[in-house]
Image: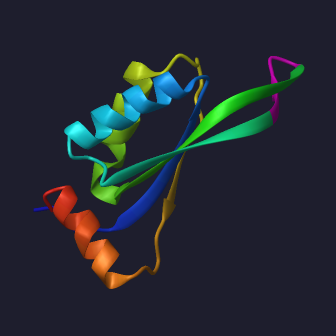
Amino acid sequence: MPAFKPVIITTTTATREEAEKIGMALLQNQIAACVQYEAISSHYVWQDEVCCDEEIRVVIKSSRCHYKAVEKLIMANHSYDCPQILMQPVSRGLSAYLRWMKTQMGL
Protein backbone atom coordinates (compact mmCIF):
# COMPACT_ATOMS: atom_id res chain seq x y z
CA MET A 1 0.00 0.00 0.00
CA PRO A 2 1.42 3.44 -0.93
CA ALA A 3 2.47 5.81 1.83
CA PHE A 4 0.07 8.66 2.60
CA LYS A 5 1.72 12.02 2.04
CA PRO A 6 -0.97 14.70 1.91
CA VAL A 7 -0.78 17.29 -0.86
CA ILE A 8 -2.86 20.13 -2.25
CA ILE A 9 -3.13 20.20 -6.02
CA THR A 10 -4.55 23.28 -7.73
CA THR A 11 -5.81 23.88 -11.22
CA THR A 12 -8.07 26.43 -12.86
CA THR A 13 -10.91 26.00 -15.34
CA ALA A 14 -12.89 28.28 -17.61
CA THR A 15 -16.26 27.31 -16.11
CA ARG A 16 -17.75 25.97 -12.90
CA GLU A 17 -19.30 23.11 -14.88
CA GLU A 18 -15.86 22.00 -16.10
CA ALA A 19 -14.43 22.33 -12.57
CA GLU A 20 -17.21 20.23 -11.05
CA LYS A 21 -16.91 17.57 -13.77
CA ILE A 22 -13.22 17.19 -12.95
CA GLY A 23 -13.87 17.30 -9.20
CA MET A 24 -16.57 14.64 -9.27
CA ALA A 25 -14.38 12.32 -11.36
CA LEU A 26 -11.50 12.76 -8.88
CA LEU A 27 -13.79 11.87 -5.96
CA GLN A 28 -15.43 8.93 -7.75
CA ASN A 29 -11.99 7.51 -8.56
CA GLN A 30 -10.94 7.95 -4.90
CA ILE A 31 -7.85 9.95 -5.88
CA ALA A 32 -9.02 13.02 -3.96
CA ALA A 33 -10.61 13.35 -0.54
CA CYS A 34 -12.07 16.83 -1.07
CA VAL A 35 -12.38 19.29 -3.95
CA GLN A 36 -13.16 22.98 -3.48
CA TYR A 37 -14.13 25.60 -6.07
CA GLU A 38 -13.78 29.37 -5.99
CA ALA A 39 -14.26 32.12 -8.56
CA ILE A 40 -11.09 34.13 -9.29
CA SER A 41 -9.72 36.71 -11.72
CA SER A 42 -6.53 35.64 -13.48
CA HIS A 43 -4.06 37.90 -15.27
CA TYR A 44 -1.37 36.16 -17.31
CA VAL A 45 0.56 36.21 -20.57
CA TRP A 46 -0.45 33.63 -23.18
CA GLN A 47 1.08 33.53 -26.66
CA ASP A 48 2.60 37.01 -26.21
CA GLU A 49 -0.72 38.55 -25.20
CA VAL A 50 -1.71 39.80 -21.74
CA CYS A 51 -4.97 38.14 -20.78
CA CYS A 52 -7.48 38.73 -18.00
CA ASP A 53 -10.08 36.04 -17.42
CA GLU A 54 -12.62 34.99 -14.85
CA GLU A 55 -11.82 31.40 -13.88
CA ILE A 56 -12.64 28.79 -11.29
CA ARG A 57 -9.80 27.72 -8.99
CA VAL A 58 -10.03 24.03 -8.15
CA VAL A 59 -8.32 23.03 -4.90
CA ILE A 60 -7.81 19.28 -4.61
CA LYS A 61 -6.89 17.53 -1.33
CA SER A 62 -5.06 14.35 -2.25
CA SER A 63 -1.99 12.19 -1.61
CA ARG A 64 1.39 12.41 -3.35
CA CYS A 65 0.96 8.81 -4.55
CA HIS A 66 -2.10 9.91 -6.56
CA TYR A 67 -0.48 12.92 -8.28
CA LYS A 68 0.10 11.27 -11.67
CA ALA A 69 -3.47 9.91 -11.75
CA VAL A 70 -4.87 13.33 -10.78
CA GLU A 71 -2.80 15.02 -13.49
CA LYS A 72 -3.89 12.47 -16.10
CA LEU A 73 -7.57 12.88 -15.21
CA ILE A 74 -7.33 16.68 -15.33
CA MET A 75 -5.58 16.61 -18.71
CA ALA A 76 -8.19 14.21 -20.14
CA ASN A 77 -11.07 16.47 -19.07
CA HIS A 78 -9.65 19.99 -19.38
CA SER A 79 -10.41 22.51 -22.12
CA TYR A 80 -7.08 24.38 -21.84
CA ASP A 81 -4.02 23.44 -23.92
CA CYS A 82 -1.71 24.03 -20.95
CA PRO A 83 -3.68 24.08 -17.68
CA GLN A 84 -2.17 25.12 -14.39
CA ILE A 85 -1.57 21.97 -12.37
CA LEU A 86 0.53 22.59 -9.27
CA MET A 87 1.17 20.31 -6.30
CA GLN A 88 2.14 21.56 -2.85
CA PRO A 89 3.09 19.21 -0.01
CA VAL A 90 1.21 19.54 3.27
CA SER A 91 3.78 19.57 6.05
CA ARG A 92 1.28 19.77 8.93
CA GLY A 93 -2.44 19.54 9.48
CA LEU A 94 -5.08 18.58 12.01
CA SER A 95 -4.41 14.87 12.55
CA ALA A 96 -8.13 13.99 12.56
CA TYR A 97 -8.56 15.72 9.18
CA LEU A 98 -5.51 14.00 7.71
CA ARG A 99 -6.85 10.62 8.91
CA TRP A 100 -10.20 11.44 7.29
CA MET A 101 -8.44 12.29 4.00
CA LYS A 102 -6.54 9.02 4.09
CA THR A 103 -9.73 7.04 4.71
CA GLN A 104 -11.60 8.74 1.86
CA MET A 105 -8.93 7.63 -0.59
CA GLY A 106 -8.73 4.09 0.75
CA LEU A 107 -5.14 4.49 1.92
In the rendered image, residue 36, in percent from the top left (x then y), is placed at 48, 48
Colouring scheme applied when the structure was drawn: rainbow
> How many marks can you see?
0
What span is colored magenta in the figure?
A: 43-48
User: Against 62, is 49 above or below?
Assistant: above
Q: Quadrant of residue 52?
A: top right
In reply to whether residue 63 is colored magenta, the answer given is: no
In the rendered image, residue 34, in percent from the top left (x then y), is placed at 36, 53
Q: Kindly identify the residue that appears in the image at 40 percent across and 37 percent down.
A: 71
Out of 65 and 55, give the one closest to the viewer: 55
Q: Quadrant of residue 51?
A: top right
User: Against 95, is 7 above or below?
Assistant: above
User: Is residue 46 left or right of 105 when viewed as pictured?
Assistant: right
In reply to whether residue 46 is colored magenta, the answer given is: yes
Q: Kindly identify the residue that appears in the image at 32 percent across and 83 percent down.
A: 95
**Please, which residue is most extreme toward the left here?**
1
Q: Kindly identify the residue that appears in the image at 27 percent across and 42 percent down.
A: 27
Q: Quadrant of residue 6?
A: bottom left
Q: Kindly identify the residue that appears in the image at 61 percent across and 35 percent down.
A: 56
In the rendered image, residue 62, in percent from the top left (x then y), is placed at 35, 55
Main secondary-structure element of the magenta-colored stretch: strand
User: Is residue 92 left or right of 72 when viewed as pictured?
Assistant: right
In the rendered image, residue 1, in percent from the top left (x then y), is placed at 10, 62
User: Is residue 52 left or right of 66 when viewed as pictured?
Assistant: right
User: Against 82, is 90 above or below?
Assistant: below
Out of 47 and 103, give the one closest to the viewer: 103
Viewport quadrant of the C terminus: bottom left
